[in-house]
Image: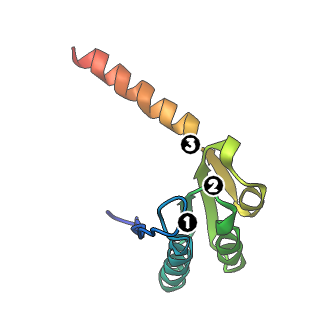
């Protein structure tokens, strides 16, 4: 993909956690994001998350002059993350638009 990098950070299973996953996954993703952003110096980063744990990384990117847009379900988005983001994109509206386009394309193809 030209100009796009997706950072995958697979979850690690944990038998000791109620969710079944380790809490360190957020931290691993934040560290990888910051390292990559400092190397590549992108104009902006798009973060798909609603968890307030990501607010410090968004703030750090902003301090480095890197705009961060957050894609999330607005009703789940934590205020700290909303406050640090340059722009918030409503995930639910985005998905509805994609669904409508897909439905329209399917009707046209018939």
78 horizontally vs 109: left or right: right
Image quarter of residue 48: bottom right
Label 3 secondary element = helix
Alpha carbon of mark 2 to alpha carbon of mark 1: how far?
Answer: 15 Å
CB atoms of marks 1 and 3 within 8 Å: no
Q: Earlier in the sequence, mark 3 or mark 2?
A: 2
In the rendered view, does 6 fall on the left or right side of 79?
left
**What element does badge 1 sit on?**
strand
90 relative to 28, above or below? above
Q: Are marks 2 and 1 in contact (CB under 8 Å)?
A: no
- For numbered disc 2, what is the local secondary structure? loop
In this rendering, which labeled residue sits more in front, label 1 or label 3? 3
At a point 51% along the width and 84% down the height, the residue shown is: 35
Say the numbered circle drawn on residue 91: 3
* 38 with respect to 1 (left or right): right
x and y percentages locating residue 5 in the rendered image? 40, 68
Residue at image position (63%, 54%) is: 50
Q: Horizontal and vertical percent for residue 42?
A: 52, 73
Q: How was the colour assigned to the protein in this rendering? A: rainbow
Sequence-wise first label, 1 or 3? 1
Decide: is 73 above or below 5.
above
The circle drawn on residue 45 is 1
How packed is label 1: few (under 14 Cα within 10 Å), some, or many (20 or more)?
many
Q: Quadrant of residue 44?
A: bottom right
* Quadrant position of the C terminus in the picture: top left
The x, y position of residue 92, in whole percent, is 56, 37
Which numbered marker is on residue 50? 2
């Amino acid at each position: 993909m030209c100009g796009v990098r997706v950072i995958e950070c697979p979850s690690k299973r944990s038998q000791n956690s109620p969710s079944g996953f380790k809490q360190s996954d957020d931290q691993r993703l934040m560290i990888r994001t910051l390292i990559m952003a400092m190397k590549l110096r992108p104009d902006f980063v798009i973060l798909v998350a609603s968890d307030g744990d990501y607010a410090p990384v968004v703030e750090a990117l902003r301090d480095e002059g890197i705009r961060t847009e957050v894609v999330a379900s607005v009703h789940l988005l934590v205020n700290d993350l909303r406050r640090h983001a340059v722009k918030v994109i409503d995930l639910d509206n985005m998905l509805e638009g994609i669904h409508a386009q897909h439905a329209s394309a399917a009707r046209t193809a018939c």
